[in-house]
Amino acid sequence: MSNIIYIGYEFKVTPLQPGVEVLIAELGYAGFESFVETEQGATAYIQKEEWHANILDDIQILQSDEFEISYEFNEIEQTNWNAEWEKNFNPIVVDDVCAVRAPFHEKFDTEYDIVIEPKMSFGTGHHETTHMMIQHILKNDFSGKSVLDMGCGTGVLAILAEMKGAQPIDAVDYDNWCYLNSLENVERNNCQHITVIEGDASVLEGKNYDVIIANINRNILLQDMKTYVSCLNENGTLFLSGFYNDDIPVIQEACEALQLKFQEKLERNNWVALKFIN
Ligand SMILES: C[S@@+](CC[C@H](N)C(=O)[O-])C[C@H]1O[C@@H](n2cnc3c(N)ncnc32)[C@H](O)[C@@H]1O
C-alpha cells in the first residue's frame, strides 16, 4: 500500500434511506472515492490531495429540508479504512443475470459473475449509474463489437462487454488508481480482449468503436462528446450515464447536434442512463 493520506467524513443521516444512497451518489461525483455505510449514515473518503475546504458546496442533499445530515471529518491512514471497507462491500445482482462481487464472496449462480477487487475505484456496481449501464449492456448485442469503456473505474463495464462477446475493448480512465485496478480486475476475470489505458479523451485520437460506454459526469460528457462521436463507427451506439433526469435536455441537445438519435432511457432514483445511435 502506498502512503496516500485520506480525509474521512462521518455523516449522520436522518431518515437513513434514501438519504444515504443519494448522499453517496453525490459524493462520488464530487470526488470522494470510497464509502462505508454505517448504522447512522455513512463514512466517505477522499484523497487529501483532491480535498478542498468547499468540497461539500455542491452536494444538494445537504441543502434539502427532507433530510437532516450532520458530519465530522478527520485525516486518516489509508490502511485503516481499506480493510474495513472490504468487509462492508456487498455483492449485487442485476436483473438476476449479472452478479458483481468481491473475491471473498461466494460465487453466484448467474449467467455473468464478475469479480471485482474494488479498493478505491468507483464502479463496484452499487451505484445507480453502474447498475443501469449493466442493464443496458445486458439488453444489447455486443457480439464481435469493438467497444470503448470511457471512465472505466474498476473496469466492470468493459469486463461485462467482453463476457457478452465484444472485442476488442479499450477501457480508459484518467485516474491512476482506476487504471491499475482495472488491469487487476481484467486479469482476475480472465479477460483476453481488453486494453486498459490511462488517460482522458486525448488518447482517443484515430480510434474507432462500434459501441461507446461512458459513465462519467455531465460536465465531462458535454466537454468530450464531440471526441466520442468522432470515434463512433456507422451504426454505432453510445451509452451515457453519470447525470440526473434534469440534465437530459442539455445532454440530448449536445448529442443531437452531433447527429445522434435518442433511443432509450433508464432511470433509478433520479439518475439516468441514455442510449443514442448514429
Ligand atoms: C462514475 S465513475 C464510473 C466507473 C465505471 N465505469 C462504472 O460504471 O461503475 C467515472 C469514472 O470516470 C473517470 N473519469 C472522470 N473524468 C474522466 C476523464 N476526463 N477521462 C477519463 N476518465 C475520467 C473517473 O476516474 C471514474 O473512474
Image: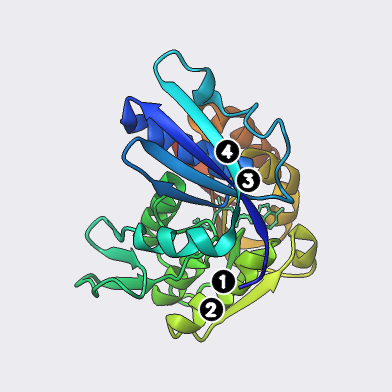
The residue at 40%/76% (across/down) is: 163
Q: On the image, numbered disc 3 is attached to which residue?
A: 31
Q: Give the distance between the C-alpha atoms of the residues marked 4 and 1, in whole angstroms.
A: 27 Å
Q: Residue at x 70, y 43 (%)?
A: 51
Q: Mark 2 and mark 4: span between their CA atoms?
A: 31 Å
Q: Is residue 73 visible?
A: yes
Q: Which mark is residue 266?
A: none
Which quadrant is home to the N terminus?
A: bottom right
Q: Residues within 10 Å of mark 2 (few under 14, many from 20)?
A: some
Q: Amino acid at mark 2?
A: Glu
Instruction: Give the side of residue 83 with respect to residue 49, left or right.
Output: left
Mark 1 is on which residue type? Answer: Asn
Sequence-wise first label, 4 or 1: 4
Rendered location of residue 154, percent (x, y): 52, 65
Image position, residue 8 (x, y; %): 56, 46
Tell which of 234 and 191 is nearer to you: 191
In the picture of the structure, the residue carrying the numbered disc 1 is 181
The response on whether ligand 1 sits within 8 Å of label 2 is no
Q: Quadrant of residue 218?
A: top right
Whether residue 146 is visible, yes or no, is: no
Distance, label 1 to label 3, CA atoms, is 17 Å
Say few, some or many: other residues with alpha carbon within 10 Å of mark 4 (under 14 / 14 to 19 / 20 or more): few
Regarding mark 1 in the picture, which secondary structure is present there? helix
- Identify the residue under disc 2: 184
Which residue is pictured at 68% across the width and 72% down the height? Answer: 197
From this view, report whether residue 146 is shown above or below residue 34: below
Q: State the mark number for residue 73.
A: 4
Residue at (62, 40) in percent of width and height: 30
Mark 2 or mark 4, which is nearer to you? 4
User: Which amino acid type is shown beneath numbered disc 3?
Assistant: Gly
